[in-house]
Every structure is written in C-alpha cells, then in structure tokens.
C-alpha cells in the first residue's frame, strides 16, 4: 500500500496535467503504451475523480515489464511537463517509492539445528489433543521469524534456540498455555489496513464531507450513503483532525473520523 503522504503529493502534481480526457491519454500512453494496465484505465470522469483512481490503480499494479514501478514510469513522463520545483518533487518521490518497494526475499533451506528443533517438537506430547492445532500454528510462526528463511544469512553458533529452551523447560501439559498466547498475539498483529468501516452521521441520507485530500478545503468527492459499508485503506492526522482514506463503490476519498465507525479489525 502506498504511503498516504506520497499518494497525496503525486495526485497534487498530476492533477493540473490531466484536465481533459485527451491530456490524460497523451500522458499515460507516452509512459505506459504497451503495458496491459493501460487497458484497465477509464479516462472519463472529473479530474478530481480520475487522478486519485489512476494513482491507486498504478500503485496496486506494481511493476511493469521493464521491472520499474508503473507509477514511477508515469512520474518520469510527467516530469517533462512540469516546472523546476515540481521536477525536484518528482525526483524525491521516485526515490521514496523505490526505497519503499518490496525486495524479493531469498528463501534458504533450514539449518541442521532447525531440523533438530522440528524433530523434537514433532515428537512432543503437545501434538496430541486440543493443543495440537495451536502447536502447529506456533511452529509456523516460529519458522517464519527465523533469519535463514527470511533471506538474512547468519553465522551458526552454539547458542541455544530460545524457543527450544523454553519448550524443554516446561512440562508438556503446560505447553498449550505457552503456545496459545503466541497464536493470539499473531492474530492480533494481523489487524490493520485495509479494513471495513460504516458511515455514521446525524442528518440527511447522503454525506457530502468526503474529500479528495485530507483537508476540509479540498474538493469534495461524490457523496456516500448513510450506513454504507466502506473499505478503509489508510489514515492520517493533521490540524483538521483524524482522517481515513476509504473506497466506496468506484470512488476513493478522505473522511474525518466523526463520520465513520471502524470495525474491530482496524488499527
């Protein structure tokens, strides 16, 4: 997911360049003419609707056939159409986007000590009864955090594995009480964006407080229905209050927390 501040700045730079359908097509085609993502772009609609949707679509699409991020390629094309100040902004945004782009991880096979740990854990009494499922989940969580499987090569040492030491030190009938909190903590950590929210306000059937950017002076987006369920994708706090970015139908916009009730899965 793109950083909200980066997203807003890209929208701010691109908006003046995309006032008409022809200007949108000219810029997008010059950057991404032979890429499949172009066929997914609807060039119609108002500028304040089109630009955020375009940036969202390119951000979700990721890298094109050349290995570059689609949104970076578009920014490079836009750089030719803007002044010196915005060219500097684009250079900085491209650096930030490249730094935040996920790198491919190298998955290395488990070491001998890890295999030994697996054998001991699989032969433990905790695999029987109710604790079995919890133990499996805890095993998955443990191996996902091992450096060798996350692409970080380390030098083997004789230091005991802390998880292995803990399991050996407790009685088998107490293993479930140790493993279950681990599983519960993992489930709690999974809460975040995107998540669901519901529109709540006191008057009228439609809410007209959705904005293009997280600002009360930003242009309005299409209204949203009272009680509608929306998808929350980001949050931002500024002097105007606590804002949430949401998608509803084919629209994307920002709304103050006064008008939305978050689900329990939201951070």
Image (cartoon, rainbow, N blue to C red):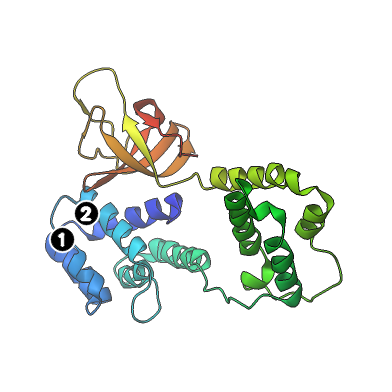
> Image point 80% across, 75% down: which residue?
156
Residue located at (34% from left, 53% from top): 12
Residue at numbered disc 1: 43
Q: Position of residue 103 (x, y in %)?
A: 52, 71
- Give neighbour class at mark 2: few <14, some 14-19, many 20+ (Cα, 10 Å): many
Most extreme residue toward the top is 202
Above or below, 114 relative to 254? below
Return the x and y of residue 148 as percentages of the image width and height: 67, 72
Q: Earlier in the sequence, mark 1 or mark 2?
A: 1
Q: Closer to the camera, 23 or 4?
A: 4
Residue 153, picture quadrant: bottom right
Residue at the (50%, 39%) spot, across then down: 267
Q: CA distance from mark 1 to mark 2?
A: 7 Å
Residue 102, placed above or below residue 183: below
Whether residues under marks 1 and 2 lie with C-beta atoms below 8 angstroms apart, the answer is yes
Query: Which x, y percent locates residue 257?
Result: 40, 30
Q: Which residue does the numbered mark 2 point to in the structure image?
A: 50
Quadrant in the picture for residue 216: top left
Q: Nearer the viewer, residue 28 or 38?
A: 38
Q: Secondary structure at mark 2?
A: helix
- Which of the 4 image quarters holds residue 62? bottom left
- Left of 111 or right of it: where is 160? right
Q: Who's the residue at 23% across and 48% down the image?
A: 48
């Amino acid at each position: 997911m793109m950083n909200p501040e980066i997203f807003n700045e890209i929208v701010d730079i691109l908006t003046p360049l995309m006032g008409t359908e022809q200007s949108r097509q000219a810029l997008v085609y010059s950057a991404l003419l032979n890429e499949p993502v172009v066929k997914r772009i609807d060039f119609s609609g108002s500028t304040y609707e089109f630009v955020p949707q375009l940036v969202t679509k390119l951000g979700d699409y990721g890298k094109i056939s050349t290995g570059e991020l689609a949104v970076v390629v578009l920014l490079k094309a836009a750089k030719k159409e803007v002044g010196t100040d915005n060219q500097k902004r684009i250079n900085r945004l491209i650096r930030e986007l490249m730094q935040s782009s996920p790198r491919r991880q190298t998955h290395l096979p488990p070491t001998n000590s890890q295999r030994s740990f697996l054998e001991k854990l699989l032969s433990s009494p905790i695999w029987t009864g109710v604790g079995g499922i919890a133990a499996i989940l805890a095993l998955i969580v443990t191996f996902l955090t091992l450096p060798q499987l996350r692409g970080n090569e380390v030098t083997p040492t004789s230091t005991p594995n802390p998880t292995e030491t803990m399991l050996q030190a407790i009685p088998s009938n107490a293993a479930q009480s140790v493993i279950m909190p681990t599983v519960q903590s993992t489930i709690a950590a999974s809460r975040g964006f995107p998540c669901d929210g519901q529109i709540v306000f006191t008057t009228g059937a439609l809410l007209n407080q959705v904005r293009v950017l997280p600002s009360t002076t930003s242009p309005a987006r299409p209204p949203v229905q009272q009680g509608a369920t929306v998808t929350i994708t980001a949050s931002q706090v500024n002097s105007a209050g606590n804002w949430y970015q949401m998608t509803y139908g084919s629209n994307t916009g920002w709304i103050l927390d006064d008008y939305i009730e978050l689900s329990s899965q939201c951070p």
